[in-house]
Amino acid sequence: MKRIFSISIVCIFALALASGAFAQEVRVGTLLSHTGPLKEFGPNLKNGCELAAKQLRAAGLNVRLFHEDSETSAIPATNAAKKLVEVDKVDAIVGALASGVTVPVAESVTCPSGVVFISPASTSPLITVLPADQKADVLFRTCPSDALQGVIAGKLAVTFSKLASVLYVNNPYGQGLAEQFKKSYEKRGGKVLAMVPHDEKAGESYTAELKKALAGKPDVVGAFSYPEHAKVYIKEAFEFFKFRNFLYCDGTKSYDIIKAVGARNVEGRWGTAPGAAQTDAYVIFNADYRTEYGVLPPLPFITNAYDATVVIGLAAYACKAKGDYINSKNIRDQLRKVANPPGEVIKPGEFKKAFGLLDKGKAINYEGAAGSVDFDANGDVITPIEVWRYRKGDMVTVRLEMDIPRE
């Protein structure tokens, strides 16, 4: 009798463990910019994450978000990431925005801890080859490398200028974009006169940097910075130097810049940024975002933040469907399986369908709001690069560059 009772207790305990695994909460941290030079972007990316989590919960996955502010700065972001990993015990993190934040956080926190870290906005080419991630394989991104944006920026600028300078934020993002722009621009016959870095912390004045950038009388100056930097030096450029012809990028695609310097002072100026393919998936996301939050603003990376949260959720459910515990290692092992072909295509919001297929042991292929989320061996994706302009106090997409040469 005692033996039967003991066997029953063991069976009940085993069933409890199994049911606990299946009911496990998926804990996802966000490490976005709510203060600092990129503070304009953080709240909208957070909305993208929240929308994805809400839809995943509605489909049957218990997702809980833990939000932290990176402050667009390496030290506070590293401390926030440690809290997410050590205190909140998250399975994955969506973030950061600045490459100068993502790199140190990956090197000191997420790679050593083996925690999945998916950036929706860090575009530095350095992230592709970050040594800390070569074995861990936990650093991914849903935005394209600036090895792509820099090509399009150079190609665009040479159509209306032959002499250029660059003002750039002195971190992996600014350095990578500036170097790739120079390479692309000069390959097509242009000449870069000066490459002028500025500090990552927003300053009160940039007249010294502007003097260096404008010394050779360039036709255009690349504004490869963040809104809190650029809104100062763009205003100084036309007030003190009578210069307005800047080339903008994702970091300077900003309503805060328009407000600070006046719409007329940026009117008609060109820029580039990672874009969203105008597919059915984007249309679905746009409609869902509008329902939840109102108009989708033309700021970069909102779609990418949504996609990052979605693929974490899909990978977590794939663990559950296999009977595996939901943890960072198992999520990592499923990421490419749920996001890359082959498999039945899953679009934004189609998560009940996705879960049903996974329960049946079938493969899925998530096609994201920003484009295909086909992670390569380095955790990178290729999505379109947008060419845009400032128009009548707004930012308007002119075209999407889909077929981008590697240079």
Image: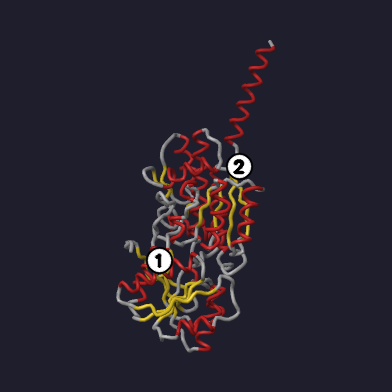
Viewer-nearest residue: 166 or 49: 166
Question: Where is 168 relative to 296, above or below?
Answer: below
Residue ID for mark 2:
25
| Residue 38 picture quarter | bottom right
Q: Tell me the residue at 38%/61% (across/down).
A: 384
Measure the alpha-carbon separation of dots 1 and 2.
37 Å
Residues packed near mark 1 inside 10 Å, few (<14), some (14 to 19) or many (20 plus): many
372 horizontally vs 33: left or right: left
The amino acid sitting under disc 2 is Glu
Question: Where is 266 relative to 73, above or below?
Answer: below
The amino acid sitting under disc 1 is Gln
Q: Are marks 1 and 2 in contact (CB under 8 Å)?
A: no
Q: How far from the left and from the top, in percent, is residue 245? A: 43, 82
Nearest-to-viewer mark from 1 and 2? 1
Q: Assign a secondary structure to mark 1.
A: helix
Residues packed near mark 2 inside 10 Å, few (<14), some (14 to 19) or many (20 plus): some
- The numbered disc on residue 16 is none
Q: Tell me the residue at 53%/35% (across/down).
A: 324
Viewer-nearest residue: 327 or 106: 106
Question: Where is 157 relative to 359, above or below?
Answer: below
19 horizontally vs 249: left or right: right
Q: Assign a secondary structure to mark 2.
A: loop
**Which residue is situated farthest in the top direction here?**
1
Residue ID for mark 1:
149
Q: Tell me the residue at 50%/58% (across/down).
A: 120
Quarter of the image with the N terminus is: top right
Q: How far from the left and from the top, in percent, is residue 374? A: 40, 50
Q: How far from the left and from the top, in percent, is residue 404? A: 33, 63
199 horizontally vs 346: left or right: right
Quarter of the image with the C terminus is: bottom left
Viewer-nearest residue: 313 or 216: 216
